[in-house]
């Protein structure tokens, strides 16, 4: 009986591994085909292939194509995470490209400080963030706190973000990272944070702070499914700064409401070389919308699975089947 059980388990393990391999290969082939049409939309297919845990030559091929496309389309953080996860598959010379670009963005901070921050932020967790916290406090740089926060957001380490700013509140240039983290933890947590921020009536705020607070209010009303208010606050946030973000988030709330006509008449989206969502909105609102986005259905299906992109199912019905 024991031998039968072990054989049974082994059979299903082999079946699972075989199924994952076939699935990874299928997504890889779709990605390769999509590259011939539009390299930007091939990215999501290769990313999906990688989630199927391919091995050997297939893994190397997927990682290689993905890194090449991240580089081509300026997706620095995605390239950074990929390079860290598969250092043996991506030459160090290629990875150095990422750091030189990040150093340019975060001037005057050098590569060594940025890379050290990344290492600490990539290891930090809710119960183990002392090294990151000490490193950031010693730097006393708002830019490094911002960089660390972006890494932590990507890793969904929201409690770590709250902790590092709680230890050094003056490093919070705006309420954005704390607010996003609170809302990710829960709507009630986000609501309490907004109450606190809005209660600080005597505080003089920069335009960027005003933009971020209005953005967070838009997030709150979207979470409570008050989409009209959500769209209104997102739109208002663009009056003070970060207009592309405001336009995109307003669009999402309008689409969820079913108000796509207003979206297309109010906002102008370009055929972006870096952002799939903006490009899809451009295609949707163009006069020849239907034919232009159809070839990208495999990619849209994957993009729509991601948090914050659910509105794509309303824009492109049929892709979620």
Image (spheres, helix red, strand yellow):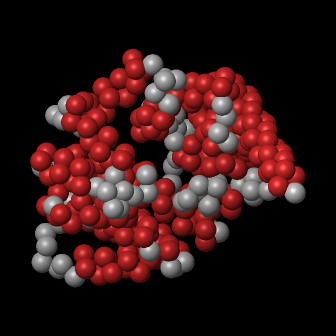
Is 35 located above or below residue 313 in the figure?
above
Residue 37 in view (yes/no): no
Q: Is residue 100 left or right of residue 83?
A: left
Q: Residue at the location (65% across, 69% down)?
A: 258
How many discs mark residues in the rendered view?
A: 0
Quadrant of the rendered structure where residue 48 is?
top right
Q: Is residue 197 left or right of residue 298?
A: left
Quadrant of the rendered structure where residue 101 is?
top left
- Nearest the camera: 319 or 265? 319
Q: Position of residue 87 (x, y in %)?
A: 46, 27
Q: Position of residue 96 (x, y in %)?
A: 35, 23
Q: Position of residue 68 (x, y in %)?
A: 53, 24
Q: Quadrant of the C terminus?
A: bottom right
Q: Residue at the location (49% across, 56% down)?
A: 248
Q: Position of residue 177 (x, y in %)?
A: 32, 60
Q: Quadrant of the N terminus?
A: bottom right
- Nearest the camera: 181 or 197? 181
Residue 313 in view (yes/no): yes
């Amino acid at each position: 009986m024991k031998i039968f059980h072990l054989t049974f388990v082994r059979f299903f393990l082999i079946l699972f591994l075989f199924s994952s391999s076939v699935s990874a290969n299928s997504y890889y082939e779709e990605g390769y085909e999509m590259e011939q049409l539009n390299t930007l939309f091939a990215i999501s297919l290769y990313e999906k292939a990688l989630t199927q845990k391919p091995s050997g030559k297939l893994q190397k091929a997927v990682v290689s194509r993905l890194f090449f496309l991240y580089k081509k389309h300026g997706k620095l953080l995605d390239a950074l995470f990929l390079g860290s996860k598969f250092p043996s598959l991506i030459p160090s010379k290629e990875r150095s490209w990422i750091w030189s670009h990040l150093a340019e963005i975060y001037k005057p901070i050098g590569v060594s400080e940025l890379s050290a921050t990344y290492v600490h932020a990539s290891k930090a967790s809710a119960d183990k963030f002392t090294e990151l916290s000490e490193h950031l406090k010693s730097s006393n740089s708002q830019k490094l706190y911002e960089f660390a926060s972006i890494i932590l957001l990507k890793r969904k380490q929201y409690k770590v973000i709250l902790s590092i700013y709680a230890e050094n509140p003056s490093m919070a240039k705006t309420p954005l990272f704390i607010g996003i983290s609170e809302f990710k933890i829960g709507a009630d947590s986000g609501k309490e944070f907004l109450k606190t921020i809005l209660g600080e009536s005597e505080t003089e705020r920069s335009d960027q702070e005003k933009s971020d607070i209005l953005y967070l209010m838009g997030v709150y009303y979207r979470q409570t499914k008050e989409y009209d208010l959500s769209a209104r606050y997102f739109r208002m946030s663009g009056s003070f700064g970060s207009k592309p973000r405001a336009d995109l988030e307003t669009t999402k709330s309008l689409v969820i409401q079913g108000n796509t006509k207003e979206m297309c008449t109010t906002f102008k989206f370009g055929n972006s070389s870096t952002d799939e969502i903006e490009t899809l909105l451009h295609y949707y609102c163009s006069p020849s919308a239907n034919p232009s986005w159809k070839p990208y259905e495999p990619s849209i299906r994957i993009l729509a699975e991601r948090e914050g992109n659910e509105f794509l199912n309303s824009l492109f019905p049929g892709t979620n089947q």
